[in-house]
Amino acid sequence: DTEVTQTPKHLVMGMTNKKSLKCEQHMGHRAMYWYKQKAKKPPELMFVYSYEKLSINESVPSRFSPECPNSSLLNLHLHALQPEDSALYLCASSQGGLQGAQPGNTIYFGEGSWLTVV
Amino acid sequence: AQSVTQLDSQVPVFEEAPVELRCNYSSSVSVYLFWYVQYPNQGLQLLLKYLSGSTLVKSINGFEAEFNKSQTSFHLRKPSVHISDTAEYFCAVKGSGSARQLTFGSGTQLTVLP
């Protein structure tokens, strides 16, 4: 079962709100990712967690704050976002972690959370 | 560094016609190649992948792709498309070492016309 579950599917928030996106996988994967995707564009990597530790931060603004409470869960906390942050946010996971993992390990994506900042 | 080029941003094709979506890559290390499909308003689904071995890989819904090292290509083909194949298709590459992150192409919108 290759399933990554994301909630909520849709989120509308004001620029002063604080909200969170949640992601869960039960495949035993130890690498988890957040991607941002604008319309008609490929996904852009934001963060990578490997064995619950933040391994990669692709120079993402601090108004996005990731959290990995355990090996199955990944959150993205949102605060003081801008309208240009409106996008599809995709969570993904892959087997093993980044270090020592086979580079060919497939990355499995969730259905995404559609975020609109007003 | 690695990169992926999808030569066609949009490919319209009539139902039951064959289609080829082109993908070329560049990398200084060994690569692993993937095709992902994104149906309207959905996330990305893995369509097929090349890791090693046979250079021709196939998906369960009739798509196939061939890894061509000399031409650095991984084109996606289907002999007869259906309306339900309408989607955005992304080619992606992963390398080893510092290039092990997934790098996507810009995507190809396949539109199957009745």
Image (cartoon, coloured by chain):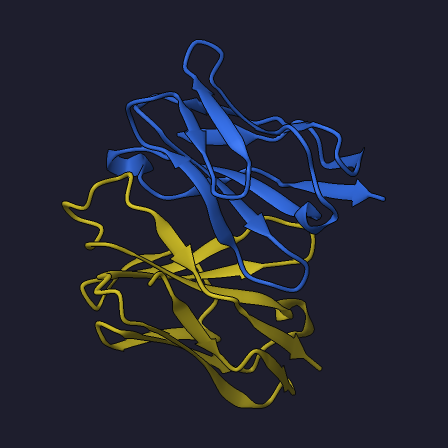
Chain colours: A yellow, B blue
What residue is rendered at 42% in x and 29% in y? B57
Q: Is residue B47 left or right of residue A69?
A: right
Determine which quarter of the picture holds residue B7: top right
Quarter of the rendering occupied by the N terminus of chain A = bottom left
Q: Quarter of the image containing the C terminus of chain A?
A: bottom right
Q: Position of residue B96 (x, y in %)?
A: 26, 33
Q: Report the residue at 56% width, 48% height from top.
A: B37
Res A48 quadrant in image: bottom left
**Residue A53 placement (x, y as % from top left):** 21, 66
Instruction: Specify the farthest residue to the right.
Output: B114
How many labels, in total? 0
User: Of A87 and A8, which appears nearest the observer?
Assistant: A8
User: Residue at 43% of width from left, 9% of height from top?
Assistant: B70
Asked whether, in this view, residue B33 is left or right of residue A81, the answer is: left
Q: Nearer the viewer, residue B75 or B78?
A: B78
Q: Position of residue B87 (x, y in %)?
A: 67, 49
Q: Is residue A35 above or below residue A10?
A: above
* Picture layout, residue B84 above or below residue B55: below
Q: Residue furthest left?
A: A100
Q: Is residue A1 above or below residue B28?
A: below
Residue displayed at 31% across by 31% down: B51
Residue A5's spot in the image, x, y percent?
42, 73
Q: Residue furthest bottom?
A: A17
